[in-house]
Amino acid sequence: MASKTPKFDIAIGKVFDSLSPHERICNECGKNFRIESGDVELLKKLRVCLPRQCPRCRMRRRMAMMANILQYYRKDCAAHPNEKAISQMDDAIPFKVYDNNFWWSPDTWDAISFGKKYNPEIPFDEQWKELLREVPHMAIERFNKNIINSEYTADSYDVKNCYLSSSVGLSENISYGVWVAYSQDSADCLRIDHAQYSYEITDSDHIYKSKYVRLSTNCTNSAFLFDCHNCQNCFGCVNLRNKNYCFFNEQLTKEEYRKRIESIDLGSRSVIEEYTHKFNEFIKEKGIYKALRMKKSPGAVGDYLNDCKNCVDVFCAASFQFILTLYKSENVRHASDIFGANDSMDVTLFGPGESCYNVIEGLYVNKVISSYFAQNCFETEYCYECIDCKYCFGCSGLKKKKFCIFNVQYTEEEYWRVVDEIKTGLVEAGTYGEFPPLKDSFFYYHDTYAYAMMPLSREEAIAARAKWRDEETKVDTKGIPAISYTDIPDNIKDVKDDILEKAIVCKETGKPFRLTPWELGFYREQKIPIPVVCPQERLLNRFRSRNSSYELYESKCAQCGRDIQTTYNPVKGLRVYCEQCYQAEMI
């Protein structure tokens, strides 16, 4: 069969002539990085140019295109003059938005109306960026599936009564959660699966009626747990297995445990602060960290990997248990937050999908290159927010289209002729397949996943040409009475209903925030003191409590001294064990 892109085939073939593993210098951070034999193999299969940035900088670019730090603004809605939409962008960001109901409606608009014919005299990047500025985007990036009373949620589906949350699925009554699946009636959680009536849970699954829990599984009626599994009625414990009635790892009788717990008022903020300090010190003294968390993952290099094969430099693959029986990943490199990914490289928030490169938020995709928020797409390249599309290049906002370039409809023959010309030019420039730089993100850097995982200061972000929103020095509560965090009652039992009518000034950022009626009821029912830190900063603090920013370090096992790789930075001085020593200690 004759090639549809003969000029491109010749140009990309020259890229791979005599290509072998070698060192390169990142054109962003200036650090050396290596193209390994596995990279060469996948790059040839995907038929894209050699990356000019190191894996971390490539990941940062993609993560900067996801705003999930629970920050929302009021932005002009391009569909309704003089109306504001709840959006992840504000009016200072030069991209148009439609409110989500309008954007997803099949009868209200067609992005093809914004199409502009490709001009070979103008660089591709310039024309593509102009199109992205003209085509309205979703005010909030999320899938259009069963979003019930969850207006302030992003990147979510099948949710009901969820508030200020991101990447939530199949859940109900969740507030301030990120990466939440199959959970109900919980708040302030990060990467949880099957949790109920729980608070401040991180990297855990199957948690019931518990608080302040990290890296734990199948735990009930407990508080302050680190790396505990199959535990009930435990408090302040680390590295326990199959225990009941333990207090700071001390085995008690049921009656002794009950008396200790009854003497601790967890509805008091000062008591929580006291035990948070004690618990953190106990982790430093007794806690053992597993170097890497992988299960059934032959040939894999990374962390939080389950049922993966030959996945290298990959982090958080199928981390939610309900996904494991449906999707597995194989032959993936330099990726994060994936499930069901195959033969792909540089993908984030991705899956299921295969043969893709430099994609973030790809769902049921195949042969997708340098794209953002693609759903049910095949052989689409440089496409943003395209749904059910095939054979599209440099498009935005299209639904159920094929053979389009810059949102203009072409015949099949004409499409391949123009695509051949564009791709050949990108290969000759050495940029084909490259994800756009930070300056082209839709969002402020400090509102994005990149900031949570790879934080930059204001000065660093501006030097990298990322967007940054300077906060106003004056606290604006928009006419709502403000209350200092110092005036919030210490104990939840002393909080009156009128706190719902006030704006709390955050202890750490000075930003005002408010409570919802559901939230106040949840705190009362679960005996949790009113937080004095705003939701966004609480989320960032949970991210900071985790290990590294998806990066492997060379280290030594704290027990046997053998060489290990780990995502825990050695400078922190943690007791990190290799797999063998960890398992021996836990049994």
Image (cartoon, rainbow, N blue to C red):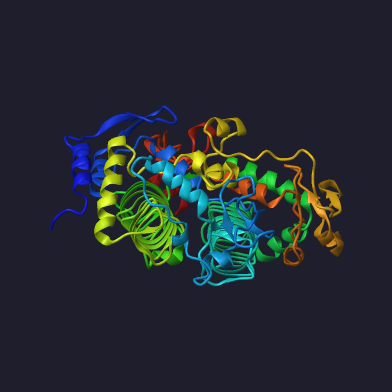
Q: Residue at x 68, y 52 (%)?
A: 535
Quadrant where the C terminus lies? bottom left
| Residue 101 visible in the current orientation | yes
Q: Nearer the viewer, residue 211 or 470?
A: 470
* Image height of 207 relative to 348, above or below: below
- 19 sits left or right of 436 in the view: left
Residue 122 percent coordinates (x, y): 38, 40
Quadrant where the N terminus lies? bottom left
Q: Residue at x 55, y 46 (%)?
A: 546
| Residue 304 visible in the current orientation | no
Q: Residue at x 40, y 53 (%)?
A: 406
- 275 sits left or right of 231 in the view: right
Q: Nearer the viewer, residue 67 or 20?
A: 67
Residue 519 percent coordinates (x, y): 73, 63
- 502 sits left or right of 531 in the view: right
* Image height of 5 relative to 256, above or below: above
Residue 24 percent coordinates (x, y): 32, 30
Q: How many dots with numbers?
A: 0
Residue 51 percent coordinates (x, y): 33, 38
Q: Quadrant of residue 48?
A: top left
Q: Quadrant of residue 178?
A: bottom right
